[in-house]
Amino acid sequence: MKKQVIISSVLSTALSVVLSSMSLSAHAQGFTVNSDLLAPGAGLQTDLGEVKFTEIPKVVNTTKTDARQQLRDFVKNIKSASGQFAQQTVGGSKAKPAQSGTFAFERPGKFSWKTTKPYEQSVISDGKTVYQYDPDLMQVTERSTKNAVGASPASILFGTGSLDDNFNVKVLPEKDGMVWLRATPKVADAGMSHIDIAFANNLPAELQILDSFGQTTSIKLRNFKSNAAISASTFRFTAPKGVDRVRLD
């Protein structure tokens, strides 16, 4: 039996906010990037593909600014990065297995989000087109970044708006050693209720997305390699021979 396709609505939402190419309405002030965060090997070095989701080590924030300011600083100072993610969805009528993989981004508008376990899927943007590829189904869907983002949260990633344009943003109480903010879509049919983002030391560490179906997806980001050179091929997609291509524009 074919596996259920679990792709991009949640992933694009997550990426859109934390990998924003536009700052919040106010500018960051007095921010100094910790050199440790910019080192190629920076981050909590745990292979997320080798541990259970519930056993991923926590990170602890030591930066004194709140989550709203840390998001501003992240957007302003981190222009490219790669790392690992793990995600788990709970709620709804059917349980979904935990997933893990790798991510990379380069502002503005280029990113790669590749699930490697328990099966392969990928969402790739070259800055002009967003490709969603499922090798098991031998299918890739394509759409222009303009039509892919529209008024959705992905508009932040591709530089067509600011977080304050599309979301009501508020700072949440500190929790689990991290600082949090909540972004609630201003458009009622945005596909999600809200997204909570946790920051630690000016890097996003965890996201919790409550969708319109009552499911909660938790995503943990680790092993950041910030402001390191990323090969252009990372953001390039070439469909293998025989793949069914679906254009959604």
Image (cartoon, helix red, strand yellow):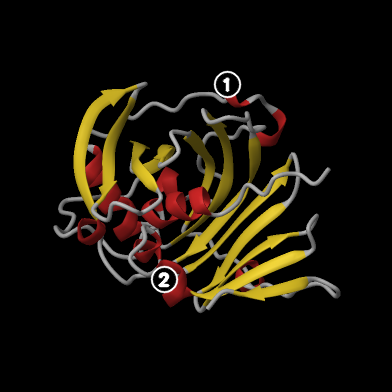
Q: Give the number of the mark in front: 2 or 1.
A: 1
Q: Nearer the viewer, residue 146 or 41?
A: 146
Left or right? Give the position of 130 relative to 156. Answer: right
Q: CA distance from mark 2 to mark 1?
A: 33 Å
- Can residue 200 be seen by looking at this rendering? no
* Residue visible at 37% across and 70% down in the picture: 150
For the N terminus, the quadrant is top right
Q: Are marks 2 and 1 in contact (CB under 8 Å)?
A: no
Residue at image x 33%, y 43%?
202
List the residue tagged with mark 1: 54
Other-residue count near label 1 (Cα within 10 Å), few / some / many at <14 / 14–19 / ≥20: few
User: Height in image: 155 above or below 146?
Assistant: above
User: What numbered label is drawn on residue 108?
Assistant: 2
What residue do we see at 57% from left, 74% from top?
248
Is residue 235 toward the left or the right of residue 14 in the image? right
Q: Tell me which amino acid carries mark 1.
A: Thr
Q: Identify the image quadrant of residue 16.
A: bottom left
Q: Earlier in the sequence, mark 2 or mark 1?
A: 1
In the depicted structure, whether residue 65 falls above or below residue 191: above
Q: Residue at x 16, y 51 (%)?
A: 30
Picture coordinates of residue 127, whole percent (x, y): 50, 75
**Amino acid type for the residue under numbered disc 2:** Pro
Q: Is residue 181 visible?
A: yes
User: Looking at the image, which is closer to me, 121 or 103?
Assistant: 121
**Mark 2 falls on what kind of element?**
loop
Q: Nearer the viewer, residue 157 or 185?
A: 185
